[in-house]
Image (cartoon, rainbow, N blue to C red):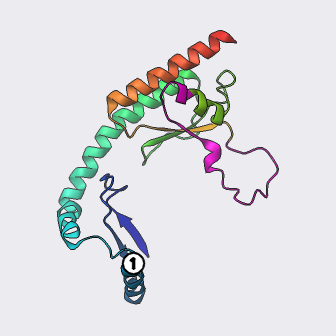
Amino acid sequence: MVFDGLTKNYRYPGWRVGWTLGPTDWIETLTRSGSAIDGGAPRWLQRAAVPLVEPAQAWQETQAMRVAFKVKRDFMLDQLKSMGNLFPRDPEGTFYCWGSVENLPPPLNDGFQFFREALKEKVITVPGEFFDVNPAKHRDDPPRLKSFVRFSFGAPMEVVQRGVARLKAMAVRTASRT
């Protein structure tokens, strides 16, 4: 089965139109379940989405997104690497940079502490340990992603630039205190 929608892949946040491809009997079961829960998206909203997924339109939008996001990704990676952040792999198909802050001065070398300090600068990051799947706490060892942070470059370029500048200033101030 394939599930997709406009919100993430097509970058239409809030436009809650999705679709499922699969065997007919499964689709019928899902349709009955979905109708019982919320009734589904209004028909007019579904019809309005059709031109957006036409191959030529979808390709044009995808290419425009790639161009816009590449500029922001390259800027963010360059700036964050210059601060000392480590990236095991540059992002290729998302609007997030996943990096380790382990080389930054304490307390910024811990993902959760980095998150807290960044909030004081009015910048939101996400601590890597939020993504460490260990729901039943079976592992006793420290979180594997303790030094990791997810940085988003999904916002407009001016916002990305302002956020990165604040993070760099935060790192400089912290380094000068140690």
Q: Residue at x 59, y 27 (%)?
A: 117
Q: Secondary structure at mark 1?
A: helix
Residue 147 rendering spot, x and y as whole percentages: 66, 36
Estimate the x, y position of residue 131 in percent, counting from the top left: 61, 50
In the rendering, at what x and y percent does residue 17 appear? 30, 65
The kind of residue tagged 1 is Gly
Q: Looking at the picture, tell me which residue is in the foreground, 52 or 125.
A: 125
Viewer-proximal residue among 114 and 37: 37
Q: Residue at point 45% right, 25% down?
A: 164
Query: Taking 33 as reference, is 176 above or below it?
Result: above
Is 121 one of the magenta-colored residues?
yes
Q: Main secondary structure of the magenta part?
A: loop
Residue pictured at 71% horizontal, 56% vertical = 134
**Residue 132 colored in magenta in the image:** yes
Q: Where does the magenta region start and end? A: 118-145
Q: Position of residue 32 (x, y in %)?
A: 38, 85
Graded by Cα atoms within 10 Å as few (under 14), some (14 to 19) or many (20 or more), the crowding at tag 1 reads few
> The C terminus is located in which quarter?
top right
Residue positioned most to the top:
176
Which quadrant would residue 28 be assigned to in this image? bottom left
Residue 128 falls left or right of residue 66: right
Using the image, determine if residue 135 lies above or below residue 1. Answer: above
Residue shown at 58% from the left, 38% from the top: 149
Residue 150 position (above or below residue 59): above
Farthest residue to the bottom: give it: 25
Q: Name the residue carrying label 1.
A: 34
Quarter of the image containing the N terminus? bottom left
Looking at the image, which residue sits at the far right?
140
Q: Quadrant of residue 110?
A: top right
Total numbered circles: 1
